[in-house]
Image (cartoon, grey):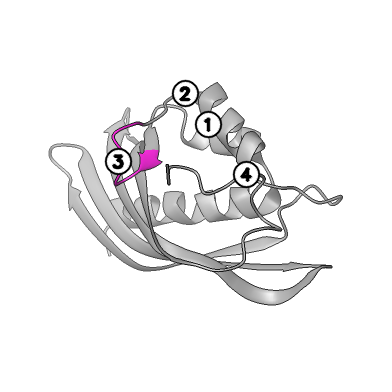
């Protein structure tokens, strides 16, 4: 696996780590220059504050500061165009959650379609699109509906 592919894989997994930690500011930094939104919706958001606002307004956090989730990202298919400094990645996600009101269970699953660019030798997200395929019990995870499902 190329160094670029490893760096891109690390960005994808860093997203999962940050959301599971409830670190919405970190998510804002990670996605600050990316267009973020549902793949089947024409709208998207961009910028640190917009990303932080999206997660803060939609994701329930518990007294420990986390959403009590584990985002498992698998089946990464990374395609790097090193000379152009661009890349794409398609992957699956499954979100597990355990809270006092519910036992450990998968609550949602889908896919990410990501684009990346290399700036000054460092890879970053250029776009993160999500597609929701399976929906379980989300009442203890989301504050108000599924983002991008309108």
Between marks 4 and 1, how big is the CA–CA gap? 16 Å
Q: x, y percentage for residue 112?
A: 36, 55
Image quadrant where residue 58 sits: top right
Label 3 secondary element: strand
Q: Residue at coordinates 31% horizontally, 29% vertically from top-left?
A: 119
- Quarter holding residue 59: top right
Please state if 85 lies on the left or on the right of 95 as rendered.
left
Q: Specify the label residue 132 is tagged with.
A: none
Q: Let me know if residue 124 appears in the view.
A: no
Q: Mark 3 points at which residue?
A: 116
> Pointers 2 and 4 in contact (CB under 8 A)?
no
Q: Which of marks 2 and 4 is in front?
A: 4
36 in relation to 138, above or below: above
What residue is pinned by disc 1? 51
Q: Separation of disc 2 and disc 4 at Cα?
A: 22 Å
Q: Is mark 4 on a helix, strand or loop?
A: loop
Crowd around label 1: few <14 · some 14–19 · many ≥20 (10 Å): many
Answer above or below: position of 68 versus 55. below
Name the N-terminal-most of marks 2 and 4.
2
Task: Please identify the quadrant where the C terminus is shown.
Answer: top left
Residue 47's disc is 2
Name the residue located 49 percent from the left edge and 56 percent from the top edge.
Answer: 13
The residue that appears at 53% across and 31% down in the rendered structure is: 51
Residue toward you, 35 or 78: 35
Q: Can residue 22 be seen in this view?
A: yes
Asked whether, in this view, residue 12 is left or right of residue 3, the answer is right
Q: Nearer the viewer, mark 4 or mark 1?
A: 4
Residue numbers of the magenta segment = 37-43
């Amino acid at each position: 696996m190329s160094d670029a592919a490893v760096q891109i894989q690390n960005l994808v997994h860093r997203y999962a780590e940050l959301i599971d930690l409830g670190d919405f500011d970190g998510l804002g930094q990670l996605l600050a220059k990316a267009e973020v939104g549902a793949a089947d919706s024409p709208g998207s958001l961009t910028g640190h504050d917009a990303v932080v606002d999206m997660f803060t307004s939609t994701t329930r956090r518990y007294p420990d500061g986390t959403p009590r989730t584990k985002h498992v990202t698998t089946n990464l298919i990374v395609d790097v165009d090193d000379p152009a400094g661009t890349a794409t990645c398609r992957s699956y996600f499954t979100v597990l959650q355990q809270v006092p009101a519910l036992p450990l269970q998968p609550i949602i699953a889908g896919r990410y379609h990501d684009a990346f660019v290399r700036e000054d030798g460092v890879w970053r997200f250029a776009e993160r699109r999500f597609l929701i395929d399976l929906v379980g019990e989300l009442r203890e995870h989301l504050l108000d509906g599924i983002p991008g499902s309108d």
